[in-house]
Amino acid sequence: MIIIQPSGGLCNRMRVINSGWRLARERREKLRIFWSCNLELNCPFESLFRPVTEFQITNIRSVADPRKLFYQKTSRNYLTNEEILARRGPDGCLDSVYVKSLKGNTYIFTWEWFYPSEDYHLFIPTDILQKRIDGITAKFGSSCVGVHIRRTDNKPSIGKSSTDAFLSSMRQELAADPDTMFYLATDDMGEEKRLREVFPDRILSNQKRCLRRDSVEGIQDALLDLYCLANTRKIIGSYFSSFTDIAADMHKIPKIIAGE
């Protein structure tokens, strides 16, 4: 059995689960997920996504959860970020010889992906969230560009993808197509205010969103932003952001990174 305890934020977890699903499929083993509801993501899996059949998922709220500890202590193999990075090749895949050497249960606790994501069919928003997503994307038309501005705790992103870099890229999009609208996803309301001042009547967003990641509402709004971005024709995104990467990867749409 492959047991995954994905860590980090929403998109890190999605990539880890996708990796675990591929590893389990390759080894023809069952997959079990321990989904931790904590300060960085305090929302059960089923409050975000429809039920899945490809793996068993268990929500936990403590690192001392006995169900998690049982598998953690009895598994023959225990992989952390360091082990995954050491065993991951240039193609992003775990070394095949190493994978074949794994015997018995394998427990993986990480925010690092270890196989490139093939698709995101495992993650279908709940009916309620999908209805909200559809309500927003119905306004996009054919010329909507996604804009993801990551701020707060992502220092590499803040340093590389400045607000001026976003403004420059957005002006280029408007010059190429005057009908362009922008769907903005950001964790900084000040950034949204500035963009609305520069591009009046061009910005769409989930204006009543909650930005608290330690709440169910905050994570649901983050998921809504992710899927709305994924339904644009192109994304102007933030440097070193899994949120930007997955939004583009989900439907294989083009992306540019502001500041690069």
Image: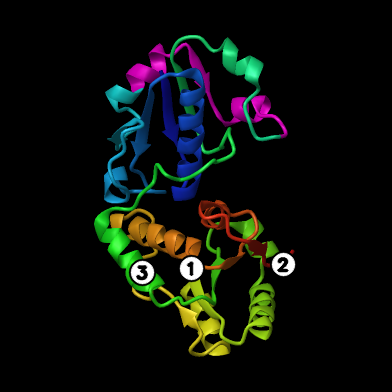
Q: Horizontal and vertical percent for residue 51?
A: 28, 41
Disc 3 + disc 1, Cβ < 8 Å: no
Residue type highlighted by circle 1: Ala
- Mark closer to the chain start, 2 or 3: 3
Q: Give the label on residue 185, or none.
A: 1
Residue type highlighted by circle 2: Gly
Queried whether the magenta region covers residue 78, the answer comes back as yes
Residue that numbered label 2 is attached to: 259
Q: Horizontal and vertical percent for residue 199?
A: 56, 87
Separation of residues labelled 3 and 1 (CA atoms): 10 Å
Q: Quadrant of the C terminus?
A: bottom right
Q: Give the label on residue 209, or none.
A: 3
Q: Horizontal and vertical percent for residue 177?
A: 63, 83
The region drawn magenta spans: 69-90
Crowding near the residue tagged with mark 1, few <14, some 14–19, many ≥20 C-alpha atoms within 10 Å: many
Q: Secondary structure at mark 3?
A: loop
